[in-house]
Every structure is written in structure tokens, then in C-alpha cells.
Image: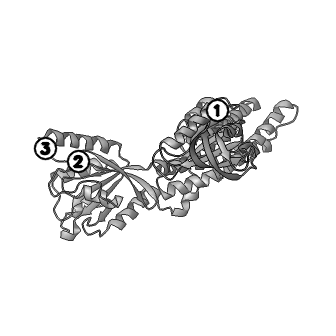
């Protein structure tokens, strides 16, 4: 990636809509705009920063569209470079023709995430905030969005910055003892260093433990609805989604394949899977559906096992329950509007919820049970806490291991060179989270997930 080049891209989804935006960033962004924009008050290169201007985009004497052109001069822009944004009429052709003109006059098509990458490389944001930008774009629920905004505000960056600076000072202290070996290393000095290392390890362990909740917010929990045919699985899926997605029929075996949708439960994403009812069958299509159900059950993170509360359990119910007990499980006793006669001895000591999908009774109780399972009783205010992602988790684990090695070296009274080497390793891994010591390969992997134009 050449930072000297001016980049351009369409920053809005292609398709029919009221507006589309073409974005340019770089040293010659205003020069490119001069070549394609004609306004009533001069050329874009003469416009003050943070202003918008009405005009037309033209290709020689041919008008392409009437637009609003925004100018944001360096360093007061998202990328800290000169930025021009052209708001044109929505649709497939207008934005594309404007982009083609910008490329014709010297801009280069931006790579995925290159605008955000430039903001990072130019020092406007750290890597955690760059990732938060993607999290905001990809957020499917209120909780995911709120957590992403908190990271964009710099909550994680500031917390990590403090521990990074603390460890840097500790390393400087250790290196001072290496440089001046004639100075005595008192037991008190070693004790203070050990305390600092212990505090840093505890802090990183706290952050590492948030990775699971962060994954729940970003990706959701794979939740499978299983049970015999005609117990109400598809009806439950529709009820949790809030709309009809699966075909509901009194005929057993209606669902023959796996249906997957994302539902929002108490502000959290749930990747719901409605599966084919498990029963003995000689029909090949239905047998394949049941085979897929068993396969998905193995990878499920939460099982909603449905029973018909108006009938007693049979051998197939008990077999399914035995399979499901290996997973986090909520037993859903459906059809209580028909009377509850199921033998409770088989579901004793299990988390159960009695409901009627038909009348809606008990659906809210099930949602609360799911939320407690996913979020372990935390409130919506908890969404503003820090939740690291998988990349952060891996780097913090390496940093913590290096600190633990330093503690062992300290306890064994090894040379301070060993402790200094471990501290440098810990700082290197910690710096990867915010981008202080990240490699080009890691950056390419992160920003390749972004859309072009962001």
C-alpha cells in the first residue's frame, strides 16, 4: 500500500437508494475533485475545510449528476489526509461513473478497509478503535453495538495503555540494575517487582475472561432447537424471531432441513437453528435431515430441547434428552394450554420452561432464561464494559505467559537479564493489541475484513 497515492471508493452499498457517497483521501484528493466537479463558487481546492458545496460532476461537457461535495482538509479528517466526499443520487450507475472519473484523473481504487487503515497508520486511532469500527458495522444487536461504541471511545485502549506504561517503567527499572551491577539488589526490590508482575498478570487474566462474552456479543451463540416431530420447534423459532420464518404444519416431519436465523434475545444475538424432528423414518430426505440434526447437536453451544407437555415421554424423548445433557440445556415444555401431564421425574434437576407457543404464554420467561444462560445475570449496562476479541485474547495470553516466566525467574533469583527478556516479550505481545508492535501481516488480515470504502 502506497500512502502517497490518493485512494477512492464508493462508501455506500450499491443499489437503488436516495443517496450514494464516493470518498477520496490523499494528497491529490482536491486536485482530482477540481477535475470533475463544477460549482458556482470556485474549485474544491479553494474551499475551506468542513464545508459542503452544491455543483455538478462532469466528464468534459457531459453532466453526470448534481451532487453535494464535502471538503475535509488534513489533518482534520478521518484519515488525517485531505478528504473529499461526493454525495450523489443513489443507484447503480451514478456513483460508479463518478468513481470511474476519479480513477481516470489520478486516484487509485481503495483496498478493503484502506481508509480506516490510513487513520490507524497516520496515528488518528489505535488498532482497537479500528476494530471497533468494523464491530459497529457488523453489529446485529443493541448489545453488540453498545459494546463496540465503548471500544471506539477508547475504553480498552486506555486500560491497556496504563498497564503497558507500567510494564515499560518496570522494564526500565530492571535494565537499570543490569547497567549498574554494582548496585545491591535488595530483597525489598525483588518483592516490589514481584508485586508489580502479579498485578499485571491479574489484570490480563480479567481481560482474557471477557473474550467469551465478547464472542457472544459479536457472533451470537449457536443454539439448536431439537425434539420429536410436531412438538412445536418451528413455531418456537418463529416466536423467538418475531416473524414467520419456518413453515408450521400439523403434519409430522414438515421441517426436513436445518433453518438458521439470528434472533435478538434481551439485546443479545442468538443463532437459532430449527432442525428436522428426530424419529425413525425410511424416507431418504427425512433421514438426511435427521442426520444433519445430530451433526449440529455436536457443535451446539445451547440446546433448546422441546417436549410436548400434554403427553408422557416415550423412549425417543428419553434418548434425545440423554444426548442433549452433554450440552448446556434448557428443556422447553410446550403445549401447556392442552394440559401438562408429562412425567417430571425425567426432567428433574434440569433448567425447564413451561410455555405455549400457540398462546404466547411463557415465551418471555424462556427469553429471560436464555439471557441468564448467555449473560450470567449481567444487565444491559454491562454492555459498556470491555470485551476483547479472539485476536486480543491470543496476544494477551502470550503476554501473560511471559510475565509468569518473569515471576519464576525472579523467584529463582536468576539474573535480571532473564527478567528483562521476559518483560520485553510481554510488552511486544501487549503492543500487538493496540498496534504498537503489530506486523504488516496482522494488519492485512484485520483490514481485509472491512468493506471497500471504509
The numbered mark, 1 or 3, whose residue comes first in the sequence reads 1
Query: Which residue, given by chain and number where applicable, does mark 2 sit on?
Result: 276
Return the residue found at the far front. Answer: 61
Up-down relation of residue 391 to residue 417 (above or below): below
Residue 292 in which image quadrant: top left
User: Depth check: 170 or 51 in front?
Assistant: 51
Residue 403 visible here: no
Q: Is residue 160 found left or right of 348 in the rendered image? A: right
Question: In front of the other: label 2 or label 1?
Answer: 1
Judging from the image, what secondary structure is the residue with disc 3 in? loop
Image point (67%, 40%), residue name: 33
The crowd level at tag 2 (other Cα within 10 Å; few <14, some 14-19, many 20+) is many
Query: Which residue, given by chain and number where applicable, does mark 1 sit on?
Result: 105
Residue 311 image position (x, y, % from top left): 16, 62
Up-down relation of residue 118 to residue 376 (above or below): above
Q: CA gap, disc 2 to disc 3?
A: 12 Å
Judging from the image, what secondary structure is the residue with disc 2 in? loop
Up-down relation of residue 128 to residue 264 (above or below): above
Residue 355 image position (x, y, % from top left): 28, 66
Q: CA gap, disc 1 to disc 3?
A: 66 Å
Query: Which residue, given by chain and number where applicable, does mark 3 sit on?
Result: 281
Judging from the image, what secondary structure is the residue with disc 1 in? loop
User: Depth check: 150 or 351 in front?
Assistant: 150
Image point (78%, 42%), residue name: 169
The numbered mark, 2 or 1, whose residue comes first in the sequence reads 1
Q: Quadrant of the N terminus?
A: top right
Q: Is residue 71 found left or right of 300 in the rendered image? A: right
The crowd level at tag 1 (other Cα within 10 Å; few <14, some 14-19, many 20+) is some
Tell me, yes or no, whether the two marked residues, 2 and 1, touch with CB atoms within 8 Å: no
Residue 84 in which image quadrant: top right
Amino acid at each position: 500500500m502506497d500512502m502517497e497515492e490518493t485512494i477512492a471508493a464508493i462508501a455506500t452499498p450499491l443499489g437503488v437508494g436516495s443517496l450514494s457517497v464516493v470518498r477520496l483521501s490523499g494528497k491529490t484528493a482536491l486536485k482530482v475533485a477540481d477535475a470533475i466537479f463544477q460549482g458556482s463558487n470556485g474549485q474544491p481546492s479553494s474551499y475551506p475545510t468542513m464545508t459542503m458545496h452544491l455543483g455538478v460532476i462532469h466528464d468534459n461537457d457531459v453532466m453526470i449528476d448534481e451532487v453535494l461535495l464535502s471538503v475535509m482538509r488534513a489533518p482534520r479528517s478521518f484519515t488525517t489526509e485531505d478528504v473529499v466526499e461526493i454525495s450523489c443520487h443513489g443507484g447503480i450507475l451514478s456513483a460508479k461513473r463518478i468513481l470511474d472519473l476519479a480513477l481516470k484523473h489520478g486516484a487509485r481504487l481503495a483496498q478493503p478497509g484502506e481508509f480506516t487503515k490510513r487513520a490507524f497508520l497516520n496515528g488518528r486511532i489505535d488498532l482497537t478503535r479500528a476494530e471497533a469500527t468494523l464491530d459497529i458495522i457488523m453489529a446485529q444487536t443493541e448489545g453488540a453495538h453498545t459494546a463496540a461504541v465503548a471500544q471506539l471511545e477508547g475504553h480498552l485502549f486506555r486500560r491497556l495503555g496504563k498497564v503497558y506504561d507500567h510494564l515499560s517503567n518496570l522494564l526500565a527499572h530492571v535494565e537499570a540494575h543490569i547497567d549498574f551491577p554494582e548496585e545491591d539488589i535488595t530483597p525489598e526490590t525483588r518483592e516490589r517487582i514481584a508485586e508489580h508482575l502479579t498485578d499485571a498478570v491479574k489484570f490480563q487474566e480479567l481481560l482474557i475472561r471477557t473474550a467469551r462474552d465478547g464472542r457472544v456479543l459479536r457472533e451470537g451463540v449457536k443454539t439448536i432447537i431439537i425434539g420429536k416431530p410436531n412438538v412445536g420447534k418451528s413455531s418456537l423459532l418463529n416466536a423467538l424471531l418475531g416473524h414467520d420464518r419456518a413453515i408450521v404444519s400439523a403434519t409430522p416431519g414438515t421441517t426436513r432441513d436445518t433453518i438458521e436465523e439470528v434472533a435478538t434475545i434481551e439485546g443479545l444475538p442468538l443463532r437459532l437453528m430449527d432442525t428436522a424432528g428426530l424419529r425413525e423414518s425410511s424416507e431418504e430426505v427425512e433421514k438426511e435431515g435427521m442426520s444433519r440434526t445430530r451433526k449440529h447437536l455436536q457443535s451446539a453451544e445451547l440446546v433448546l430441547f422441546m417436549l410436548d407437555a400434554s403427553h408422557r415421554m416415550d423412549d425417543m424423548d428419553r434418548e434425545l434428552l440423554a444426548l442433549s445433557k452433554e450440552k448446556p440445556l434448557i428443556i422447553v415444555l410446550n403445549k401447556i394450554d392442552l394440559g401438562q401431564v408429562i412425567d417430571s421425574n425425567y426432567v428433574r434437576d434440569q433448567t425447564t420452561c413451561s410455555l405455549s407457543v400457540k398462546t404466547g404464554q411463557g415465551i418471555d420467561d424462556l427469553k429471560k432464561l436464555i439471557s441468564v444462560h448467555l449473560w450470567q445475570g449481567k444487565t444491559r449496562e454491562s454492555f459498556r464494559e470491555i470485551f476483547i476479541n479472539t485476536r486480543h485474547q491470543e496476544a494477551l495470553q502470550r503476554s501473560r505467559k511471559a510475565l509468569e516466566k518473569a515471576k519464576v525467574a525472579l523467584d529463582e533469583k536468576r539474573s535480571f537479564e532473564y527478567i528483562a527478556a521476559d518483560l520485553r516479550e510481554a510488552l511486544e505481545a501487549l503492543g500487538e493489541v493496540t498496534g504498537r508492535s503489530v506486523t504488516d501481516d496482522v494488519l492485512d488480515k484485520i483490514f481485509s475484513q472491512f468493506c471497500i470504502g471504509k
